[in-house]
């Protein structure tokens, strides 16, 4: 840690430690030319150190940073826009049952188009009011001054350990690059594991493309004719409701083709990430310049050949340097001195054992941390499934308020067998705002499991794609059929209440709850630690290398 502290002192003395805002980083990534260097601020620490592979396309990095910074805000503001739109319609119409008379155009625009527009605008622009600071090499390393550029690159370990969090933009080449591994090693020795944010590139792309696709799909179905129900008996009502709520197989097949492609892409990428971490070996990492390899390997040896330095120690040292600039100059009279000291780290007989400490950290605690956050290759986090299902809730709200969409709630209630408008609207809310969306979010993890089964049985890309699309269509049709059964059961229960119908419906609710729990909430069973269990995390780390 002594070398890094000297590098930090030298960087402060020369004014090398500068930070940019999220807008600076994103503009650098999307700008067709390098243009002017943004006006950066000298800092003593940053909120995020962005670690990435240069081979990853810039547009994917833009999506990833927007996703990390803006997704939660986009969800909140789009939901707020939908609520405010609903409130405005309620005030204008006088009651919820009269909102249908406002007109379908106002309902679509207020409850669907406006929230979607707010979501997209916030997703791409929400960071403009974000004051968090970033160290991103393409922004913070001067291209015009070669001496300053060389000094800044040599001081990168100091910038890493003075960062609150490391944002890892993972792609297939990330763990193969020695510079990326070096940054990760420095951060591992100076920070807690949960401060490393591993962001695989599939997550932002899938989230954004899926929510747009679902929005377009449900929006196209809003103009469908209202259901024609046979209310003569509970059996006829059930089957007529089932027929109305069930999506034709050909529509499932069309939707399954892009979904199958994504499932194969996600399975490959996520499995590769976990496999790379399971078999990680620093010595196998690639490096453009062998002189860099020697310096970085020796630096890792020095880092992991002693008890792990605590982050607070580094912070205290940095603060003391602020009070004694003269001593900083004495410690590091020149950049060459720091580099020479780094290169002169002796190679010890236990060299492989020392490097294995870092390898074990990546294979163990860091991999467990990633699994704990993102799940395994067949998992999609509940938060992402709920996010992409937002258009389903918006569409369900439009369906409820437009009264199926006859625009006359009293007529719809009488034609579908309900005793009052309130009973009709409450039942419709249960159908379209609870059962339908909750069943819908199950499709993504179930499709991943089906796709992995196909990948194990079928060889060849064409055969896999055909078989995967067929399997995904069958899975989508099955989930949709179960959804139709749940919706039909609730409608029959309200119109023809009886104990056996109530018992059957509650059994279905229990089965849905169990399936949701099993898919999203149960423990992974792989030994991964809880995010907030700092004590258990420290125990795991201490078994890997000295803390």
Image: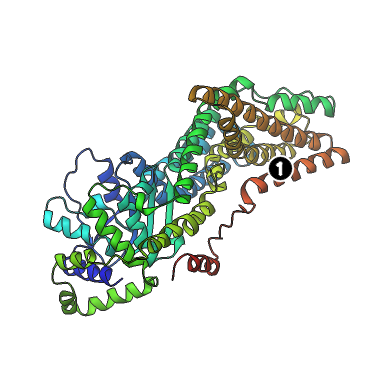
**Which quadrant of the rendered structure holds the N terminus?**
bottom left
The answer to whether any part of residue 162 appears in the image is no
> Outermost residue toward the right?
499
Q: Position of residue 208 (x, y in %)?
A: 45, 38
User: On the picture, is 69 further left or further right than 233?
Assistant: left
User: On the picture, is 500 further left or further right than 238?
Assistant: right
Residue drawn 84% across and 42% down?
A: 503
Q: Position of residue 119 (x, y in %)?
A: 45, 42
> Outermost residue toward the front?
349
User: On the picture, is 370 further left or further right than 457?
Assistant: left
Of residue 295 and residue 18, the one placed in the foreground of this image is 295
Which quarter of the figure has residue 473? top right
The residue that mark 1 highlights is 512
SS category of the residue bearing label 1: helix
Which quarter of the figure has residue 233? top right
User: On the picture, is 191 further left or further right than 32?
Assistant: right
Q: Is residue 545 above or below residue 261?
A: below
Q: Position of residue 422 (x, y in %)?
A: 72, 40
**Which quadrant of the rendered structure holds the C terminus?**
bottom left
Q: Is residue 476 above or below residue 11?
A: above
Q: Position of residue 409 (x, y in %)?
A: 68, 32
């Amino acid at each position: 840690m002594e070398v890094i502290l000297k590098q930090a002192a030298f960087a402060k003395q020369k004014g090398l430690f500068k930070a940019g805002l999220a807008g600076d980083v994103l503009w650098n990534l999307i700008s067709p030319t390098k243009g002017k260097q943004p006006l950066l601020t000298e800092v003593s620490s940053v909120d995020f150190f962005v670690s990435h592979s240069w081979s990853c396309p810039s547009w994917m990095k833009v999506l990833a940073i927007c996703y990390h910074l803006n997704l939660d805000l986009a969800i909140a503001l789009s939901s707020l826009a939908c609520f405010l739109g609903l409130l405005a319609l309620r005030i204008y119409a006088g009651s919820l049952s009269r909102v249908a008379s406002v007109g379908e155009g106002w309902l679509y625009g207020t409850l669907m188009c406006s929230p979607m527009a707010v979501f997209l605008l916030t997703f791409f622009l929400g960071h403009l009011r974000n004051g968090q600071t970033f160290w991103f090499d393409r922004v913070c390393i001067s291209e015009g001054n070669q001496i300053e550029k060389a000094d800044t690159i040599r001081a990168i370990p100091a910038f890493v350990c003075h960062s609150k969090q490391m944002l890892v933009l993972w792609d297939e080449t990330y763990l193969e690059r020695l510079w990326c591994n070096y940054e990760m090693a420095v951060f591992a020795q100076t920070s807690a594991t949960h401060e490393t944010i591993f962001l695989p590139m599939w997550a932002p792309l899938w989230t954004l493309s899926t929510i747009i696709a679902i929005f377009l799909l449900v929006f196209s179905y809003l103009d469908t004719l209202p259901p024609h129900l046979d209310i003569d008996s509970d059996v006829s009502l059930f089957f007529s409701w089932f027929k109305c709520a069930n999506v034709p197989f050909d529509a499932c097949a069309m939707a399954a083709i892009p979904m199958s492609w994504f499932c194969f892409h996600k399975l490959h990428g996520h499995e590769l990430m976990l496999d790379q971490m399971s078999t990680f070996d620093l010595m196998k990492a690639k490096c453009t310049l062998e002189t860099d390899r020697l310096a970085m390997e020796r630096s890792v040896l020095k880092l992991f050949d002693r008890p792990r330095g605590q982050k607070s120690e580094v912070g205290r040292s940095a603060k003391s340097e602020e009070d004694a600039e003269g001593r900083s100059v004495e410690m590091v009279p020149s950049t060459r001195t720091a580099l020479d000291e780094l290169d002169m780290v002796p190679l010890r007989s236990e060299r492989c054992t020392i490097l294995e400490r870092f390898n074990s950290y990546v294979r163990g605690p860091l991999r467990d941390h990633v699994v704990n956050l993102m799940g395994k290759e067949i998992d999609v986090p509940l938060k992402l499934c709920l996010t992409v299902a937002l258009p389903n809730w918006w569409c369900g709200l439009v369906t409820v308020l437009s009264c199926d969409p006859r625009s006359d709630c009293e007529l719809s209630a009488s034609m579908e067998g309900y005793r009052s408008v309130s009973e009709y609207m409450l039942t419709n809310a249960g159908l379209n705002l609870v059962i339908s969306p909750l069943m819908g979010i199950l499709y993504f993890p179930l499709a991943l499991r089906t796709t992995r089964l196909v990948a194990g049985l079928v060889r060849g890309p064409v055969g896999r794609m055909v078989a995967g699309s067929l399997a995904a269509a069958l899975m989508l049709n099955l989930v949709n059929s179960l959804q139709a059964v749940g919706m039909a059961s609730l409608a029959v229960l309200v119109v023809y209440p009886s104990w056996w119908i109530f018992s059957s419906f509650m059994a279905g609710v229990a089965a849905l709850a169990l399936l949701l729990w099993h898919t999203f909430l149960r423990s992974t069973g792989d030994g991964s630690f809880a995010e907030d269990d700092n004590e258990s995390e420290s125990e795991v780390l201490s078994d890997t290398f000295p803390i």
